Amino acid sequence: MRLFWIDAVRVFAILSVIGIHVSAPVFKHTEVGAATWWIADFINSFSRFGVPLFLMISGSLLLGKEYDTLDFYKKRALRLLFPLVFWTAFYHLGINFLNGRELFRLKDIFFLIINKGGFYHLWYLYVFSLAMLFVPFVNMIIIGKKATSRDYYVLIAIIVIFSILLQSTLILQVVKNIKFNWYISSMTFVGLMLVGYIISKKYDTINFNSKVAIIIVLLLSLIGAILNYTVAVKLNIHKDNFVIIAGGPLSLIISSFIFYAFAKVGGHLRPSKLLSSIADTSFGVYLLHPAIIFLSLKAFPVLKSLGIIEIPILFCITFTISHCTIYCMRRITIFRYIT
């Protein structure tokens, strides 16, 4: 049975992610403290829960079920591998081509992935893939399943993988001066998935007003916006993802209350074809939307000079084109593997 409140969370999450990325240029390139900067800051701070919400959705749908460890990996490996390979190549080749750079060097792609996780939003796929390695073992604890000898071998293999990553971090830092530590976030990702599962199963036993939850979300997001200003002025740190980051304490609390509020009022949501359609395309929209932002600013450079007006215009263009494109792509079987 389709859970329409989960669809609503997906839609809310993807709109939040787009909101972050269309407000980020205004946030970064506007004078700190100006009215335009504050508006971009508010939009950014009130949108920083997109990725955690996607993780909570994954936890609510994946955990608490009976499945074999290797079957779990086999079933999801290609679902992640195809998008990883395609979109990494798409952004590397496409963006370089449009910027007149050299198109294809495997070494560049490798170090791009190591340094940034592919493109500025693709890090999520790489970290999520690593987090998925631990899901079967967290699931065993939840359902009380006894691990087999094969499960222990798989767990040892995962430990070896992370020990190699740890060693690689030091080598790349010393030899190539490359910062490589984004994989560490996979532990927090597992935690967010577990929180999503717990909320989805226990929300009806929690006696907490959903309206109060929303008020807490608004207050904490406001605090995040104020802290962005404080660190920019006092510490000269002008980064939109410094205070509220995916998996950070503020993000964890805010996302948990949002997820709880949606679960609590989910029974009152009516089925909506439009909502379900947007939810179905949310993964593809996540992957595609930075390209639409890039192309829109290329096609309409005047947007860059519009300041705060740029954000709603760019938001509408990005969401509409991304959704329609992915919707059409998903009508073709082969494109479903990458969207």
Image (cartoon, rainbow, N blue to C red):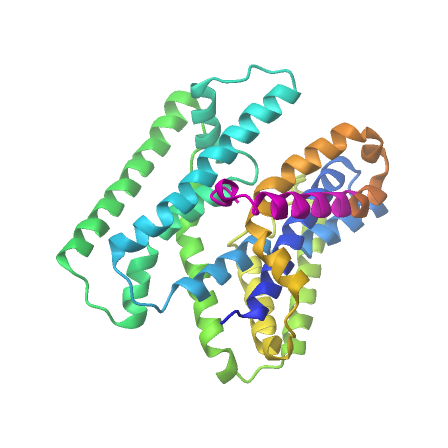
- Total residue callouts: 0
Q: Is residue 294 in view from this perspective? A: yes
* Position in image of residue 303 (x %, y %): 82, 35
- Residue 30 vs residue 190: left or right? right
Relative depth, front residue between 265 and 120: 265
Q: Is residue 231 in view from this perspective? A: no
Q: What residue appears at the point 39 percent right and 51 percent down from the top-left corner?
A: 131
Q: What residue appears at the point 44 percent right and 54 percent down from the top-left corner?
A: 189
Give above or below for 202 relative to 311. Answer: below
Give above or below for 326 relative to 251. Answer: above
* Position in image of residue 100 (x %, y %): 64, 16
| Residue at the front extreme, as displayed | 332
* Position in image of residue 24 (x %, y %): 70, 42
- Residue 157 vs residue 11: left or right? left
Main secondary-structure element of the magenta-colored stretch? helix
Relative depth, front residue between 87 and 161: 87
The magenta segment is: 314-339
Q: What residue appears at the point 39 percent right and 52 percent down from the top-left corner?
A: 187
* Position in image of residue 16 (x %, y %): 66, 54
- Residue 94 vs residue 44: left or right? left
Per the image, is 336 magenta? yes
| The image quarter in which residue 47 lies | bottom right
Per the image, is 252 magenta? no
